[in-house]
Image (cartoon, helix red, strand yellow):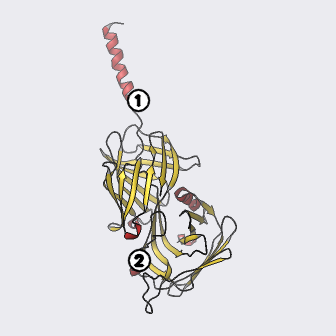
Amino acid sequence: MNRIASLLLASTMIPAAHAQQKAIAPPVSGLMVSYRFWPEQFVQWTGPEVPYSMVELDYDENNGKPLYDFIVTSRETGKRIHYANQPQLVAIAKAQDGEAYAAQIEFTRPDSEVNGATFDLRLRLQDGTPVEWRFIQGSDILQQGGGLNAMPELKIPVFAYREESAVAGEGSAIVVGDKTSMAEMWKEISKPPYFVAWHGALTHAATTAVLAAGSESFRVAEAPSELKPGAAWKLTQESGRTLVLKIEKAAAPHYTIGVESNPLVKQTIEAAYDGTNWAIEKIRYAPVHAEDHGMTLQFSPAFGQTETSTMDIVIGKKTKIASATLTGTPVKYQLSMKAPDWTKGKVLTGSNTISAEGVTLVVHP
């Protein structure tokens, strides 16, 4: 081969080799976050008579086709188990918390929500155990009744934020099988004899965020080799669940990525890419029909950019409800809650695998 032919061959090979760019790993925080928003929510904290520390009913009138999601929180493990009346809700809950079942739910409500109003719920758990819950409204629904519920007894950080709320009234109770748990007096906020609350709440515009523990794995079925608008990652699980992350805005090194996972929630990630690793700047969740009620995880500095970051949890535009310190990177980290006071001592550790081939999250409390 003469020199000219050799040079021509080399010049044609360079673009071909350049085209085989390496696939880029997806922008994953490594946190396991469960976010939920409901127009109406009922909660009661329960005593040792039943194997649950809390019961919850999430309700959406849904134009006359009600959506119900009844949740029990295991006292022993902190795991949340869902019973929902629609297959879509079951699938979403299973993806978020790992265990969910279809159930026939009977819910009877009064004509108006006033002090003394009574709400009744009936269903059967997966093992056939009957459940009856009578919630009695103990006050008017007011903005002053809103705010963040303290949940120090749970092993993992769970944040239940209420925009408007009423407390439970005396006589609120749940019966699980042959065991009955009556709502106890809410001593922290009661001021007898002028005001007595019982340990439960009825909320309008309820946000629940869980920094969960557990494990899950995804195969990266598709991954881009170039970061530009429209480029996407497709993550799949053996169960058939699919997660799509698509770049909406690109201004290197900063990117805005939309996440297609839950049809009821709009999720976006803001992240920076240094050519090797992602640093997560912000994650936002919002109900698709009520974006003003969204929740943001704000990282400063970006998580993965330095050894230590602060994570603030913000409701709406500026209501900060919690903060934590993150030490490490999305691959290996420790999250230590700092505020509010009742969260101090709650710690999560992540040991994850994040690559262009797959993502495995393992988070321990």
- 97 lies above or below 124: above
Spot occupied by residue 130 in the image (x, y as percentages of width and height): 68, 72
Who is closer to the viewer here, 19 or 235? 235
Query: Which residue type carries mark 2?
Result: Gly
**Residue at position x 39%, y 66% in the image:** 344
Q: Residues within 10 Å of mark 1 (few under 14, many from 20)?
A: few
- 7 lies above or below 235: above
Spot occupied by residue 161 in the image (x, y as percentages of width and height): 42, 71
Residue position for label 2: 146
Label 1 secondary element = loop
**Residue at position x 40%, y 37% in the image:** 225
Q: Which residue is at the far top?
A: 2
Report the disc number at residue 20: 1
Q: Residues within 10 Å of mark 2 (few under 14, many from 20)?
A: many
Spot occupied by residue 183 in the image (x, y as percentages of width and height): 55, 80
Who is closer to the viewer here, 16 or 321? 321
Q: Which residue is at the far bottom?
A: 193
The answer for how far apart the CA atoms under marks 2 and 1 are is: 55 Å
Decide: marks 2, 1 in contact (CB < 8 A)?
Answer: no
